[in-house]
Amino acid sequence: MKRAIGLLITIAFANSVFAAAEIGKPAPDFTATDINGKTHKLSDYKGKIVVLEEYNLDCPFCHNHFKTGAMQELQGEITGKGVIWLLVNSAGRNSPSYRTPEVAKKEWATQKIKATAWIDDSSGELGRKYGMRTTPHMFVIDKNGILAYQGAIDNRPSPEGDPRTARNYVREAIGKLMAGEKVQVTQTRPYGCGVKYGS
């Protein structure tokens, strides 16, 4: 199991063939549809902080964040402050990790997800535009549409244990932005399983 997980991490880190959003520059605009059929554009959220979370519950790293309830707690805490949190599933339609809208809605309810919306990115367009490589891979965009943070959710790259004990970079970045202060850690190496993009 540990060997398999190690391989997944290696593959995820080695996968750098996509474009990547750059810290301190405007985050790439996008138009995407959620599992309820609603359209979301980054430009519609100007004036608000936006979080993008690359998601795949089949990944043991991602699964642990939800199994422990840590991710839902963070989502609830952050969205409660007026932040937009978009869950992004970029698994291609031929991947076992792809979710139809109906299945995704059930998973949303079962996992008690507290994000703003679940984006169906089965085309991979949004993920590739941002250079999303792992699940999870996090992005924080400030009120002016500038990318303020991207990388790991925390400093604890483990598929087991309690993520609440880690230093959470996303919470930290949002706290700094809301206080009008400079984000100290703007980029880290994302950990987890490689995103299951389609062809």
Image (cartoon, rainbow, N blue to C red):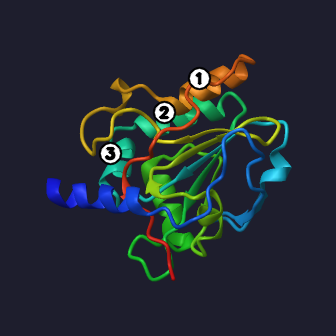
Q: In the image, is 189 to the left or to the right of 85?
A: left
Q: Sequence order check: which comes first, mark 1 or mark 2?
A: 2
Q: Is 183 rendered above or below residue 48? A: above
Is residue 120 at all visible to an observer of this figure?
no
Q: Are marks 1 and 2 in contact (CB under 8 Å)?
A: no
Q: Sequence order check: which comes first, mark 3 or mark 1?
A: 3
x, y percentage for residue 47?
84, 36
x, y percentage for residue 198?
50, 79
For mark 2, give the secondary structure. Answer: helix
User: Which of the two residues, 81 or 110, is positioned nearer the viewer here?
Assistant: 81
Q: In the image, is 2 to the left or to the right of 172?
A: left
x, y percentage for residue 13?
39, 55
The residue at which mark 1 appears reads as 184
Indicate the amino acid at tag 2. Glu
x, y percentage for residue 192?
37, 52
Residue occupying image coordinates x 63% and y 57%: 130
Q: CA distance from mark 3 to mark 1?
A: 27 Å
Residue occupying image coordinates x 38% and y 50%: 62
Q: Is 36 rendered above or below residue 116? A: below
The residue at which mark 3 appears reads as 64
For mark 1, give the secondary structure. Answer: loop
Quarter of the N terminus within the rendering: bottom left
Q: In the image, is 48 to the left or to the right of 133?
A: right
Q: CA distance from mark 3 to mark 2?
A: 13 Å
Q: CA distance from mark 1 to mark 2?
A: 23 Å
The residue at which mark 2 appears reads as 73
The nearer-to-camera label among 3 and 2 is 3
